[in-house]
Amino acid sequence: MIDYWSYYHARLVEALLIHLQLVTISLVAALFIAMLVIFTCLNKGKWLSGLIYFFSALYSVPSYAFFALLIPLSGLGTTTAIIVLTLYSEYILLRTFSTGIKQIDPLIVESARGMGMTDRQVFFRIQLPLASKSIFSGIRLALTSIIGIATIAATINAGGLGTILFDGLRTQSMETIIWGSLLTIFLCVFSNVVLRLIEKVVLRNVELED
């Protein structure tokens, strides 16, 4: 194992960084879309429910099939991978975000509006901060999910840790498979630790404002 790292560490690190890039871009794009959808449709229950059902249907599509369906439209490579990972994240984010915001006491929202706040101010200053725990829970869940799914992106030449895993399967190299798996686990754990730290800082600031 140590010898394998000494010979191939550059390739392993490169695959890890590409994987991280795919996941980060996809998650940021999904967060932006989720915020926009929730803000636009929060007071339109049927629209929001319909979108959540739509993304849940997409989430049920096997990743291999999803990649294959998009290849004629966006081709092989990073673009298709990011689109698929973003859409997979969207269902988790929309469900957890909407649940967290709906659990806020309506009297708090009405009081904020009574003080003259606009819908935008209520959303960003009241609803999002109070739903922070649910929001970060959704982000962590989406992140863990797409880190695993992103390994399949190697089949469409998007790179990442999937290239290590599939090379290990193709050559029947147990060391390659183990290193690919270990780095995937490391990325998942490291990303969740970073999110936990960010969550603590955000929640501490919210409590101070309260």
Image (spheres, rainbow, N blue to C red):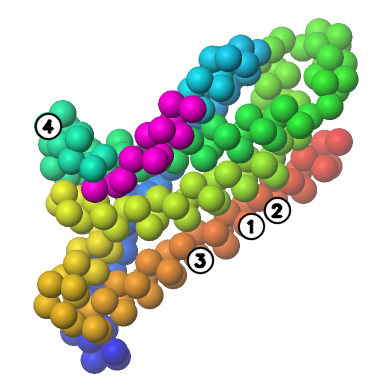
Q: Looking at the rendering, which quadrant does residue 135 occupy?
A: top right
Of badges 4 and 3, nearer the viewer stands: 4
Give the residue at mark 1.
Answer: 197
Magenta-colored span: 53-64
Residue type at mark 2: give it. Answer: Lys
Quadrant of the frame with the N terminus: bottom left
Mark 3, secondary structure of its residue:
helix
Vertical placement of 6 versus 142: above or below?
A: below
Give the residue at mark 2.
Answer: 200
Residue type at mark 4: give it. Answer: Pro
Give the residue at mark 3.
Answer: 189
Category of crowding for the residue at label 2, using alpha-carbon neighbours closer than 10 angstroms: few (below 14), some (14–19), many (at least 20):
few
Q: CA distance from mark 1 to mark 3?
A: 12 Å
Of badges 2 and 4, nearer the viewer stands: 4
Q: CA distance from mark 4 to mark 1?
A: 41 Å
Magenta stretch contains residue 100: no
Q: Earlier in the sequence, mark 2 or mark 3?
A: 3
